[in-house]
Image (cartoon, helix red, strand yellow):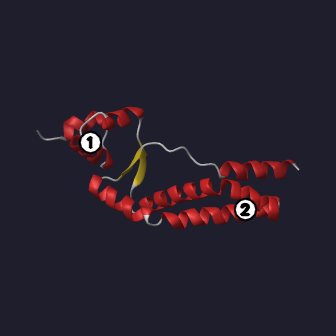
Amino acid sequence: MKVIWLAALLAVSACTAKPLTMSVPSKAGHDLNSARKAVHFCTGQSDEGGNSAVIGGYMTNIVLFGILPGTVGTMLVQDELRTQGEYDQVDRCLTERGFERRELTPNESAWLRNTTEAERARRLDHLVDGGKIEAYGLTRVQ
């Protein structure tokens, strides 16, 4: 009985959505424009990941809890499953293209917010290329 409850707890925790944080796709030698194109391309594939997550959720919950409770349980979290599946599919697609998700620190987020649009684009270019705030002024030619 404890094994069933442990499996149920694991299944429910796997269905929860990860909190969204500010991030940029990062790849050495690339800039904001190439990252934007990659994200745009990968966003077109997000439906596939969302559908797969929902189908997997239904199948898992039906196996763990039975037809009726599993179906009802999945229906309650279907939107969250779809959203998380879409995020994960975009991340997989970007990884296949050589990018990796770089979570921005609160300091980096503030650094991007507190500037003009043109300067923000230059700073994002720097971050997409793998740069750090500390090295931003050092790499620019005046």
Q: Is residue 53 above or below residue 111?
A: below
Q: Is residue 1 above or below residue 58?
A: above
The C terminus appears in which quarter of the rendering? top left
- Mark 2 packing: few (<14 Cα in 10 Å), some, or many (20+)? some
6 vs 131, left or right, is: right
Residue 69 on image: x %, y % = 80, 58
Q: Residue at 37% x, 61% y: name it.
A: 40
Give 138 or 36, whichever is nearer the viewer: 36
54 vs 94, left or right, is: right
- CA distance separating discs 1 and 2: 44 Å
Q: Residue at 52% x, 65% y: name it.
A: 47
Q: Residue at 43% x, 66% y: name it.
A: 44
Residue closest to the far right: 1
Q: Is residue 16 above or below residue 70?
A: above
71 vs 137, left or right, is: right
For mark 2, give the secondary structure: helix
Residue 22 on image: x %, y % = 43, 43
Residue marked by disc 2:
60
* Between marks 1 and 2 in the image, the one whose residue lies nearer the viewer: 1
Query: What is the number of the mark on residue 120?
Result: 1
Q: Earlier in the sequence, mark 1 or mark 2?
A: 2
Q: Amino acid at mark 2?
A: Thr
Q: Residue at 17% x, 41% y: name it.
A: 140
- The quarter holding residue 107 reads top left
Residue 16 on image: x %, y % = 63, 49
Q: Amino acid at mark 1?
A: Arg
